[in-house]
Image (tube, rainbow, N blue to C red):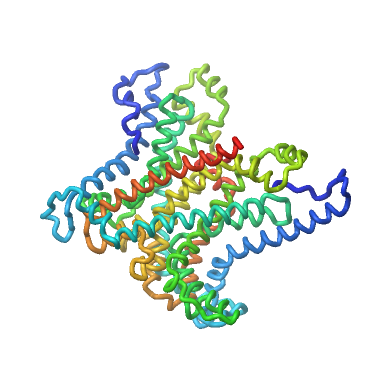
């Protein structure tokens, strides 16, 4: 279960037990490797296909050894770049807006905890119980009347809704960890609420800001439902760009793989770097 | 959603000159976020509820007769629609169970010291980070395709006939695909839960001569409750909303074999412009999500309480 000791210094049974332990450990390690590799295979296969010719990508039996080419990436770029711009604007814009709205709330809930604070927090989380399909119809009609359909602003507004509870919860969790004595000392020195926020809470929770921002960016980047239903051409982000390959019925596997790799790679790299913080964010700080 | 009534109503009434000369009150800091969420989730939801009582089609928006619960009646009596309801639950439930089992196994395996553990742990999250639509098109084309897909080749090399996975076993294939996406989430949350388990508890159990199974049942499992709750809650909410994976792989087919509520609502609202029926289905999805989330949490609480007692 937990850390099985490599050697057992005072074991009565001596070598035989520790040998059996070691053998069992090696088998378990091999199994672990195999399972994780199996999980990585679809991605590895996709990335590999991105460097093949169309004929090689489509071949049966599959081609494992080949001379890598870059043509697929070049061909994907012209339609990739505008979608990338839309995705970046929507993701960064919504993350900023969620922080502008969410940071003060998280601060107030953490530093001035009232009886209502827990209720407010729970209510914010419960907005996550609201499936996008429960609001999409009025949002669509409203956006149509306000001219927000197929605009970056429209996407930013919806992604902010998606990420705001996350920002409040995670930042509340980080700000609650700042020792209360620091705030009290500041209050004694006559610090105002905004000074407490800008001089203490914000600087001391910067690691939390980074982790939360990363998670919000990833969620907005990967969002599909609002993207497909609220944008069509002008503001179409990367999810819509990939969705268009659906209609090509898999005739251009190599090019599809290159496009998909371009879409997925930034998120993968960021996610790998921040894996530990992601877990905390994904569980809303409930499991640390 | 339900606690709107208990909002701090002081915010608007407190005069803007509180203690210590600062004009910012805690409530004033909380209100912008609350207001934003109310405007973008509660208000649209009540509008969805309102629309669901009308026969409302965007093709003929002028005639919008009130028809009461007729949309709900259609949803809950038409056998086709009941199938969609069932699909939604099967898809979410099947994936939840698979991700919990595989995720728990992976968490236990990764919670040991071995070479490359940190790297494996880091790489494991990959499939969760992949955009759902990418998952769908990659699996559909390169893995599950009966002609040139990788799995077809594996089957052939084993001397078996290639399987048309999405045609013959559509729901199973979609569940496998989404399990691939969500297992890392379960594994990493459960692993974090395991790592907070104090070593001395395990050691004490071993000294008392507990078998690995007893150790798991009486120490690991009760300690895991919170992590399991998080996984169940987050996945239930997310899996009932699965959309991109279905849009990109099966388009709800063949027939309606893989149509779930979100995909159904998309079809009704954006292909048939049937706002009334789509709204009723939206309300139903919200109700289903809340019931299942609360019920599952209660269930886990009870099961583990029993374990703790025994």
Residue A105 seen in this snapshot: yes
Horizontal side of B58 relative to B154 (left or right) equals left
Residue A227 seen in this snapshot: no
Q: Nearer the viewer, residue A49 or A30?
A: A30
Instruction: Tell me which corner region of the image, top left, top right, bottom left or bottom right, holds residue B166.
Output: bottom left
Q: Position of residue B209 (x, y in %)?
A: 76, 42
Q: How many marks?
A: 0
Q: Position of residue A174 (x, y in %)?
A: 53, 35
For image coordinates 73% across by 60% down, the residue present is A27
Q: Position of residue A164 (x, y in %)?
A: 41, 42
Identity of the residue furthest to the front in this view: B310
Horizontal side of A108 relative to A8 (left or right) equals left
Image quadrant in which the C terminus of chain B is located: top right
Image quadrant in which the N terminus of chain B is located: top left
Q: Is residue B61 above or below residue B32?
A: below
For image coordinates 73% across by 54% down, the residue present is B114
Identity of the residue furthest to the left in this view: B63
Q: Nearer the viewer, residue A205 or A249?
A: A249
Q: Is residue B207 above or below residue B87?
A: above
Q: Nearer the viewer, residue B112 or A91?
A: B112
Q: Nearer the viewer, residue A265 or B230?
A: B230
Q: Is residue A171 above or below residue A51?
A: above
Q: Position of residue A165 (x, y in %)?
A: 42, 41
């Amino acid at each position: 279960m937990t850390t099985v000791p490599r050697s057992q210094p005072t074991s009565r049974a001596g070598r035989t037990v520790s040998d059996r332990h070691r053998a069992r450990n090696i088998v378990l390690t091999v199994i672990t490797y195999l399972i994780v590799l199996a999980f990585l295979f679809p991605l590895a296969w996709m990335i590999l296909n991105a460097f093949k010719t169309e004929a090689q990508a489509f071949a049966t039996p599959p081609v494992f050894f080949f001379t890598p080419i870059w043509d697929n990436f070049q061909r994907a770029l012209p339609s990739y770049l505008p979608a990338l711009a839309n995705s970046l604007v929507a993701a960064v814009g919504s993350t900023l807006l969620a922080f502008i709205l969410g940071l003060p709330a998280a601060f107030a809930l953490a530093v001035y905890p009232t009886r209502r604070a827990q209720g407010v927090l729970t209510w914010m989380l419960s907005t996550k119980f609201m499936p996008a399909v429960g609001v999409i119809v009025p949002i669509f009609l409203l956006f149509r009347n306000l001219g927000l359909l197929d605009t970056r602003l429209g996407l930013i507004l919806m992604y902010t809704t998606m990420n705001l509870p996350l920002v409040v919860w995670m930042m509340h969790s980080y700000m609650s960890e700042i020792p209360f004595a620091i705030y009290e000392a500041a209050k004694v020195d006559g610090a105002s609420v905004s000074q407490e926020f800008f001089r203490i809470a914000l600087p001391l929770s910067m690691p939390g800001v980074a982790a939360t921002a990363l998670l919000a960016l990833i969620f907005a980047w990967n969002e599909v439902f609002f993207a497909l239903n609220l944008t069509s051409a002008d503001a179409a982000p990367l999810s819509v760009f990939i969705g268009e390959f659906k209609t090509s019925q898999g005739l251009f596997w190599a090019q599809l793989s290159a496009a998909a790799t371009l879409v997925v790679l930034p998120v993968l790299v960021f996610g790998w770097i921040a894996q530990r913080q992601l877990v905390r964010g994904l569980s809303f700080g409930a499991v640390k | 959603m339900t606690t709107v009534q208990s909002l701090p109503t002081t915010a608007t009434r407190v005069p803007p000159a509180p203690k210590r000369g600062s004009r910012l009150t805690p409530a004033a800091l909380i209100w912008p976020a609350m207001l934003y969420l109310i405007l973008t989730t509660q208000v649209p939801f009540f509008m969805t509820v309102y629309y669901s009582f009308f026969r409302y089609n965007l093709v003929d928006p002028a005639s919008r007769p009130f028809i009461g619960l007729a949309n709900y009646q259609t949803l809950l009596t038409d056998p086709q629609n009941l199938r969609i309801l069932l699909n939604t639950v099967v898809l979410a439930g099947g994936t939840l169970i698979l991700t919990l089992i595989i995720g728990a196994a992976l968490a236990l395996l990764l919670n040991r010291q071995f070479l490359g553990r940190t790297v494996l742990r880091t790489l494991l999250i990959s499939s969760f980070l992949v955009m759902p639509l990418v998952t769908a098109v990659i699996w559909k084309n390169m893995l599950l395709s009966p002609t040139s897909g990788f799995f077809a080749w594996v089957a052939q090399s084993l001397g078996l006939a290639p399987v048309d996975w999405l045609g013959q076993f559509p729901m199973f294939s979609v569940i496998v695909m989404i399990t691939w996406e969500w297992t890392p989430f379960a594994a990493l949350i459960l692993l974090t839960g395991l790592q907070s388990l104090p070593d001395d508890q395990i050691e004490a159990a071993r000294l008392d001569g507990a078998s690995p199974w007893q150790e798991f049942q009486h120490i690991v499992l009760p300690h895991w409750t919170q992590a399991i709750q998080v996984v169940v809650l987050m996945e239930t909410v997310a899996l009932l909303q699965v959309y991109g994976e279905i849009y990109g792989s099966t388009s709800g087919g063949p027939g309606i074999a893989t149509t779930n509520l979100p995909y159904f609502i998309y079809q009704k609202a954006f292909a048939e412009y049937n706002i009334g029926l789509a709204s009723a289905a939206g309300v139903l999805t919200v109700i289903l999500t809340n019931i299942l989330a609360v019920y599952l949490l209660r269930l886990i609480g009870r099961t583990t309480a029993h374990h703790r007692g025994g």
